[in-house]
Image (cartoon, grey):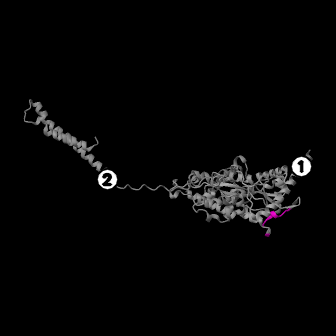
Amino acid sequence: MDDPSLLLMLSSLLHLHTYLDPTSSSNPPSSSAAAASSAAAPLLFFAIASVLSYASSTLRHRRSRRRRSSSSPSPPPPPPPPRSVASPSTGFFFLSSDRVLSLEPSARDARFRSLYGVSHPVFETLLKNLRHLDASAAFPSSLPLDRAFSVALARLSRGLSSRSLARSLSLPPALVSRCTHALTRLLSTRLYPRYVTLPANPDHLLSTLQSFKDITALPNLAAAIASSPVRLRLRQPPHPNPSHPNSAPEPGTDLLRSPSRSFPSILLQAVADHRKVFWDACVRAPGSSDPASHLRDSSLYRLLLDNNGSSGALPLRDHVISVRGQHVRPYLVGDSSYPLLPFLLTPFSSSSSAATSSAPALEAFDSALAKGRAASVEAAIGLLKGRWKILRNLNVGLDHAAQTVVACVVLHNMCQFAKEPEDEGRYMWRDPPESPQPASLVESERSLHYMGESLRQALAEDLYERQQKLGSGAR
């Protein structure tokens, strides 16, 4: 009986029974025992009523006290203890100098590649470059330079979002983002000219020309160019309702989508040699653009158009040869999405001038170009996205997207110079195939296009003739 009103009612009934008990009437009892019993009954009922009345008042008092305590504001909970940067996961992630030195070189490099995407020597070279640039001011002051650098490398190589990596390392997500942005900014601006450049050494250029000739049988092929979309992970609006003002996409995001792709992207234009080393990288076009327009908007295009070649700025003008009366300087090769120019040769397959060449010569030239592209720039892009998984689904803001892509190009070249492993099963990434759209001819390139046609025709006929001689000699 926890209800005080019920106890109070029973107490009142017992009091009433005391006064209305028939044994207390004027009729005399029949015996002395009955008289004693009838005299004691009112006292018993009175005692029970008193106990019930006391219990009722006690329950009312307790309930009123509970209501007062619940209506009064409760004291605020104590603040959570500050999250420490050090944790078991960070101890596993950040390797101390003693622990690094205690590992065998092969085990140490494997450990560094699993954590940071590069071997220990490449890691130390990068860290030395950052210290030489006095990069400490660019990174968050709450972490030492080597740890901030480790966090950024881990995010680029693993492809994790800042929130996911921060959760595993017990770090604030904003700190992980700041570390990543600081590293990619330094790599894409300060270290890019040191590691991504056209060959300045004539011997290096001659070695490259010979290597491509061994692969394709084409003379004076210097490098290959290709365009690759980099998928973007855009932030979803908090309100999916189209009528809500905050659900509208960011301005310009419609330019990131192309009818040929189901995802938003930006374009990477890359030039690479037979070593899968990038000579140039440009990220200046949204996914809706085309490779030809992207090329014409790049500094590489303006450099290749420079007929003066002042100050030796264009080493591709060296080593000019003659093929069937045509002066052929070192050139690039690309697919049909690029314009046909004297310094950029494309396949016959989608060209209207293909009828001027015999079918065997056409097929031989197109096959040679495909071999050159596959062995250089296409393999380099696959290796780039295989090592730096963030480029498979770029989870940074649009204002940091281009610098992140270029930074990964710098890291890729450093790995190539250090002869890092190229295990295709682990590091190679294959983008979904896309059919190139033939480049449109612009009026300013018309004369250059005709020169490119003549050069391509001469190279195709020369290649086919040499293959025929080689085949007849073998028989």
Is residue 319 a member of the stretch shown in magenta? yes
Question: Is 426 on the left or on the right of 81, as rendered?
Answer: right
Numbered tag placed on residue 96 in the rendering? none
Look at the image and tell me whether residue 8 can be seen: yes
Taking depth in this image into account, of 225 and 459 the one nearest to the observer is: 459
Question: Is 337 on the left or on the right of 19, as rendered?
Answer: right
Q: Quadrant of the C terminus?
A: top right
Which amino acid is tagged 2? Answer: Arg
Return the residue at label 2. 68
Numbered tag placed on residue 468 in the rendering? 1
Is residue 457 a member of the stretch shown in magenta? no
Taking depth in this image into account, of 199 and 443 the one nearest to the observer is: 443
Q: What is the crowding at mark 2: few (fewer than 14 residues within 10 Å), some, or many (at least 20)?
A: few
Q: Position of residue 312 (x, y in %)?
A: 80, 68
Q: Which residues are magenta?
A: 310-320
Which amino acid is tagged 1? Answer: Gln
